[in-house]
Every structure is written in C-alpha cells, then in structure tokens.
Image (cartoon, helix red, strand yellow):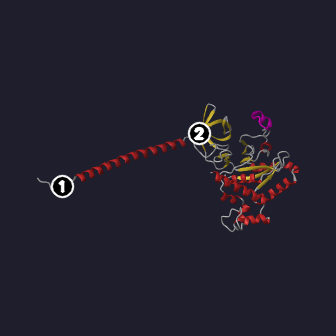
Amino acid sequence: MKKDCNDHISEEDYFHGARRAARKERNRIVQSDRSKYKKSDLDKAAKNKEVIEIKHSHRGRVLSISSQGILVDSEGIQYMCSLRGALKKEKTRQKRLITVGDFVHFDVTGDEGAIGHIEERRSVLSRADNLARTKEQYIAANIDQVLITISVVNPTLKPSLVDRYIISSEKGNMLPIVVVNKTDLINEATAEEREQYDTFRREYSKAGATIVAVSAVTGEGLDALRSLMKNKASVFAGQSGVGKSSLINAVTGLDLTVGEVVDKTRKGSHTTTQSHLIPLECGGWCVDTPGIKSFGMWELHREEIAGYFPDIEEIRGHCKFQDCMHISEPDCAVIKAVEDGDLSSMRYDSYLSLIDEADEEHHRR
C-alpha cells in the first residue's frame, strides 16, 4: 500500500520532537530533584524545631560572667556553666552572646552546667563596644530600672553621660532613675560645682527625670532608695568612683569589702571589674556594674535624638523647617530658646554632643 504524503514525517520534525521529549524528561528529573530537596529542607526545619523544644533540666538566671565561666542561680543553687557548642558558634552583632540577668535553660553533668537556650529578653541595657564600635556590648538584661549613679564632687557631675544612660534605658525598655550619691560632700564642692549641681537638679527635674539624693556614709535618702528597689530588678550604672558598690553595701547590708577586691584582683580600692546580679532580702535584684569613663551609644540616629529630650521636643515644633536639627539652621526655635534663657544650655550642650557622636559613627561606618 502506498503511504499518503501527509503520513510522511520529515527529518526536521523528527528531531524537533525528539528535542521536545528530551526537554520534558529533563524537567521531570529537575522537579523530582526539587521535591527531594524540599523534603530535605522540611526535615531539617523539623529537626531544628525539635532541638529548640528540648526541655533542659534546669532554668536559672545569670549572676555573673568571668573567665571561670557563667555563674547561674537556679532555685537558690548556683552552678558554674558554659555555653553549648551551637550557641558558641552563633554569629551576632553583640560582643558577647549572654549577659548578667539573662534567663537560661541548662543541663548539669557532674558539677558543671551546659547552657542550651537563652530566653528572649524583655529589656536590655547596652552600649557600643569601646574598641570595635561596631559591636553591641550588653551590660545587663531583664532589668526594670537603671539607677544612674552620679556625684557632685569626686568625681564631678557629667550631664552628657547622664543623658546617655537615660536614652539607653528608655531604648532598652527600662525606667531611668538618677541617684545623686555623696551628698555628705556637697559642702566641699566649689561654687562652680555647686551651681552646676543646682542647675542639673532644676533642669532635669523639669524635663521629667526622677532624682534621688543619697549618702552611703550618712544614710540620707537610703530608705527612699530601698523603697524604689523593692521587688524590682535594678542596675547601678555610672562613671568610676561615684560609689555604686558602697551604695549597694548600704542598701543590702552586704560587705563587699575593699580587702577582698584587692586580694583577688590586685587592683585599686573600690574597683568593680565585673557585673554581678545580687538578690535582695526585700525582694528583687540589683546589679553592680564596673565604672566607666565613656558611654558610647548603640545605634542612635541623629534624627531621633531630640525625641529623648522632652524640653527640646516641646519647642522644636516652632522651628521654621520640619527637619531642623537645631544646630545652625535659620529661624530655629530651639536655638532661640537657649539664647533667651528658656532652655538650659546644659541640656542643649548635651544634645549637641550626642549629635556629634551620631555623626562620627555615621562617617566611621
């Protein structure tokens, strides 16, 4: 029988169909491989979830961190712990993954604990690392209030440092309270120091700051301070030499003697080199932190700084330009308020120092 010409398949059509079939087969293989990988990813996610949901035998709170390890309190018993391998390898923007005040879950083998999970923090006090500046350095976590400790003399008052602590407290979801220690030495202050202190109390109180005057020597104001600390987690923070440890001794009845510090560290008297979380008999906790000379802000942008100064925030709406930074812009209501004496130059100078720091950080990055 003779074939109809329409039944004839050309060589071109033949190879075109073959290529189409080959392409279809390749797609089938790829889809099969993708399904395999998808299954693998799901299995991996499920496995990770199982790891997270593992119940560790103990839950506790970090009391201190030293070269010996991480000291954790769990129901009144203290354990020296270390981080599990997975936590050690975790890459973060923090200088250290864990900090004093953290709630952790850990297992105990022999007399050592291994921390496998750190609970989410409800608050954290942190600053920019002094060396790298690109790392966040935790100071304490899960804290209710920051007791910003200052003195009028020995050392002298630094308003800009106080503002750094106030802003960091509010950014970290904590209440800032200014504690003026060494009131027994105010009579020894120079006229300039006394005037600065009077201005500070007046202007910062007007801006809404809570200020408590105390003396670890005479006992002035200690009852008021204890009342503020009752059933709260508090961290004492401030520059070196303001007497944070002395205040803690006076409030708690502890005896963190100078001799013990010198014997262990061979450093000067009244020197705190590590943060410590201390339980209070009246309920609550307090943290003693090392004194500092400077306090670098962590991720504070220049546009948001004015919002942390209620007195400046109240005036800025009258500036000519909506994006006015109150530095040298024309018709700036904030600058005019300073010139007219309606806004304290102490507050304004502190604001400018934070603007300068934010600009330096921006250029550094």
Residue reaching furthest to the right: 187
State yes or no: residue 67 in magenta: no
Q: Secondary structure at mark 1?
A: helix
State yes or no: residue 263 in magenta: yes
Which residue shows up at 67% across the image and 53% down it? 360
Q: Secondary structure at mark 2?
A: helix
N-terminal-most mark, 2 or 1? 1
Residue 362 % position (x, y): 64, 54
* Residue holding disc 2: 88
| Magenta span main SS | helix
Which residue shows up at 71% across the image and 50% down it? 145
Q: CA distance from mark 2 to mark 1?
A: 72 Å
Residue 322: mark: none
Q: Relative to residue 254, is residue 232 depicted above or below? A: below
Residue 161 % position (x, y): 74, 51
Left or right of 13? Residue 122 is right
For badge 1, the amino acid type reads: Asp
Residue 8 % position (x, y): 18, 54
* Residue holding disc 1: 7
Report the mark closest to the observer, 2 or 1.
Answer: 1
Q: Is residue 208 visible?
A: no
Which residue shows up at 77% across the image and 34% down it? 266
**Callout 2: 10 Å neighbours few (<14), some, many (20+)?**
few
Q: Give the residues in magenta.
A: 257-268
